[in-house]
Image (cartoon, rainbow, N blue to C red):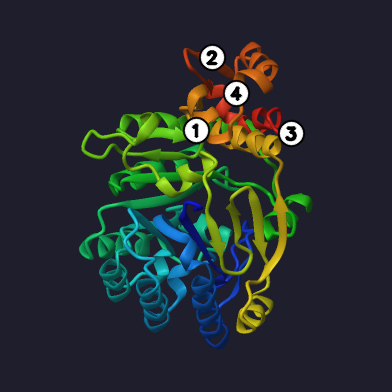
Amino acid sequence: MRPPVESLYIHVPFCAQKCAYCAFYSEASSGEMMNRYVAALVREMELVAADLRLRTVFFGGGTPSILNLRQWEVILRAMDRLNLTGAEEWTVECNPATVSLDKARLFRDFGVNRISMGVQSLDERLLERLGRIHSREQVFKSFNILRAAGFENLNVDLMFAIPGQTMEIWRETLREAIELQSEHLSTYEVIYEDDTPLFHQLQAGEFSVDEDLACEMYEELLTQTAAADFRQYEIANFAKELGGQDLTGGIPGRACRHNVNYWRGGAFYGLGPGATGFVRGVREKNWANTQLYCEQLERGQRAIESREELSPLKRAGETAAFGLRMNAGWPFEEFQRVTHFDLRGEWDSEMDQLVKQEWGVREGERFHLTPQGLRFADSAAELFLR
């Protein structure tokens, strides 16, 4: 009998407006389409529920919190009926402008226990530059609402190297964000994705990229988070301990367990328009089109655009690459348990190359990247792909 899948990602594709940097699939919110999406999502959950025994759930977007109370009630009641509640970690992404006490209490009533709040910046001018719909004041107000509703595991998302962002602004944003005393901090360097407004502005010469400043901002991030007792456990992620307890492998207790499952090569279902899943060596991707997604589910079938069955070696290479994003890197025994390959066999020369570059370290029974290697982890990871 096949073991059930323990992680579920659900994509909510709606936003009040598209942010200037965003390349994820999303669209403007529309009441009629949102209701249709909710009904289709419930149908998709029904089709996969028998293969799920959930430890982690993550609602991402888009802006999941843009759904109204009635729409959330339909989703949550369906999850309860299908035995999809009760996960150890259940995260919902929220925009500070769309948080309400009623919605927060509804989440808690059904077992949501972690909120990831898309703050990005606490500078009003930069929020406007990014196309965010919230103000800095709403960040503090929403954070307090979530605490009042009983949430004890909150993440704050921040961005750095934003056009027009100085070191002084970044330093102050970090200071204020840390003072919120969240349990987790996620940070992202701005990436200029094709077909985003920021990319076109860069191409038009409206601003230039300062790589040195970006590196300095990253160093400031490491300094301030360490001083505030956050532990970096992945390139962009920092978490507090949980009563002195770690997860396995020295990962801080407040680390995002859902994302750790990704980086450790675990299986997960992806539901919703544009969502990707990885189950038993097969990668599936749903159509990134809400209309088409709904039409397929209304016919009683999943809206899968593509399936790719990975060879064991290719799968192991991707698992190696993702796992090296984490500070702990890969314990050799753990990697072999997950992939059935020995990192010291197939990738011995690649590890040696990274050690010579001072990007990697062989340390007893594991391999991990150095701080410099983590800064350029994408380049290091490419060596492991097959």
Q: Residue shown at 58%/84% (left/top)? A: 33
Q: Which residue is mark 1?
A: 326
Which residue is situated farthest in the right direction here? 204
Check disc 3 and report its element: helix, strand or loop.
loop
Q: Position of residue 53 (x, y in %)?
A: 41, 58
Q: Is residue 285 visible in this depiction of the protein?
A: yes
Instruction: Examine the rendered structure and indicate whether residue 334 appears above or below residue 195.
Output: above
Nearer the camera: disc 3 or disc 1: 3
Q: Residue shown at 57%/71% (left/top)? A: 17
Q: Which residue is mark 3?
A: 386
Nearer the camera: disc 4 or disc 3: 4
Label located before the other in sequence (2 or 4)? 4
Q: Position of residue 57 (x, y in %)?
A: 42, 58
Q: Is residue 99 left or right of residue 236?
A: left
Q: Which residue is mark 2?
A: 362
Q: Which residue is mark 4?
A: 342
Mark 2 and mark 4 residues within 8 Å of each other at the beta carbon: no
- Tag 2: amino acid: Arg
Mark 2 to mark 3 CA distance (whole Å): 21 Å
Mark 4 to mark 1 CA distance (whole Å): 19 Å
- Tag 3: amino acid: Arg
Mark 4 to mark 3 CA distance (whole Å): 14 Å
Label located before the other in sequence (4 or 3)? 4
Instruction: Examine the rendered structure and indicate whether residue 114 appears above or below residue 40.
Output: above
Q: Position of residue 235 (x, y in %)?
A: 51, 35
- Tag 4: amino acid: Asp
Nearer the camera: disc 2 or disc 3: 3
Mark 2 to mark 1 CA distance (whole Å): 15 Å
